[in-house]
Image: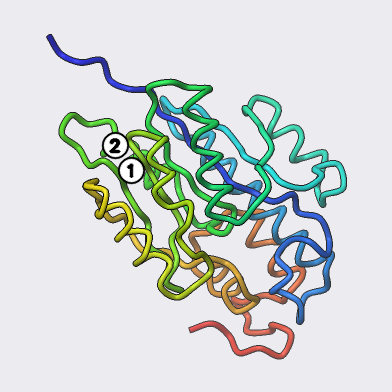
Amino acid sequence: MSQPVPGAVLLVLAKAPVAGRAKTRLCPPATARGAARIAAAALLDTLDAVLAVPDAVAMIALTGELADAERAAELADTLAGVTRFDQCAGGLGTRIAHAHVQVAARAPGSVVLQIGMDTPQLDPATMTEALAALRAPGGPDAVLGPASDGGWWALGLRDPNASALIADVPTSRADTGERTLAALRAAGLTVQPLVEMLDVDTARDALEVASSGRAGRRFTAEVAAVLGDPASGRTLGMERPR
């Protein structure tokens, strides 16, 4: 008898885009409010892509006060049909593991693909393919999307409770992705790599992603408004991204 295909959850780990608390590495040249507006645009475009993935449930683990965020009303409307819960206290690794456990409790038996709000160029097709790999009989136990700065932009798990394996992996380091992969493999999990992506952490990152033609419309427009138009090369004294 064939086994039933597991459900799929797309988990977004996000910070409310509040001025002075979100995307602060964009400052300078962005102001605190400008950086938060870019963060809000990135989150909205990410949510649009997530909600366009077929046969998947969207959930968001949020920290910060959404009511104080830039584009708060638009975010509230977009999140109206999304399961939302708070992140726990502690370091990023602990919060990631806790969020996966929350998914396991809310959607037992489902695979999970977790992303952040730093890749507004992420499209539904890439997420669909990653979830399909996790749901396939004989597929990998995990998928991991490396980021160009040495971290990772996506973590998918066939068993969300396996997130405990990476709770103590140091984050925001040039070897975070490598350490995460090693922790998963050391526990005997098979890991399939995903395409490498650029996380938007700095103004230069934002300009590069906005000029790629792959980012969402809100993010591209907000980067042009806050940092200048990367297509024209007029970008607050910064070189045009190559």
> Based on the displayed image, in which of its 4 quarters is residue 139 positioned?
top left
Left or right: 149, with 236 as reference point: left
Left or right: 129, with 190 as reference point: right
Instruction: Specify the farthest residue to the top.
Output: 1
Instruction: Specify the farthest residue to the left.
Output: 1
Which residue is pictured at 63% across the width and 80% down the height?
232
Residue 134's tag is 2
Which residue is pictured at 69% across the width and 67% down the height?
223
Mark 2 closeness class: few <14, some 14–19, many ≥20 residues within 10 Å: many
Q: Identify whether 65 is placed above or below 137.
A: below
Which residue is pictured at 50% across the width and 64% down the height?
213
Q: Nearer the viewer, residue 141 or 196?
A: 141
Residue type at mark 2 is Leu
Q: Nearer the viewer, residue 166 or 77?
A: 166
Residue type at mark 1 is Ala
Q: Identify whether 141 is placed above or below 27.
A: above
Left or right: 28, with 104 as reference point: right
Left or right: 121, with 131 as reference point: right
Image quarter in which the N terminus is found: top left
> Based on the displayed image, in which of its 4 quarters is residue 208 positioned?
bottom right
Q: Residues under labels 2 and 1: Cα distance?
A: 7 Å
Picture coordinates of residue 11, whole percent (x, y): 52, 39
Contact between marks 2 and 1 (CB within 8 A): the answer is yes
Mark 1 closeness class: few <14, some 14–19, many ≥20 residues within 10 Å: many
**Badge 1 element:** helix
Residue 206's tag is none
Picture coordinates of residue 66, whole percent (x, y): 80, 43
Q: Identify whether 224 is placed above or below 75.
A: below
> Which residue is under mark 1?
130
Which residue is pictured at 80% across the width and 67% down the height?
34
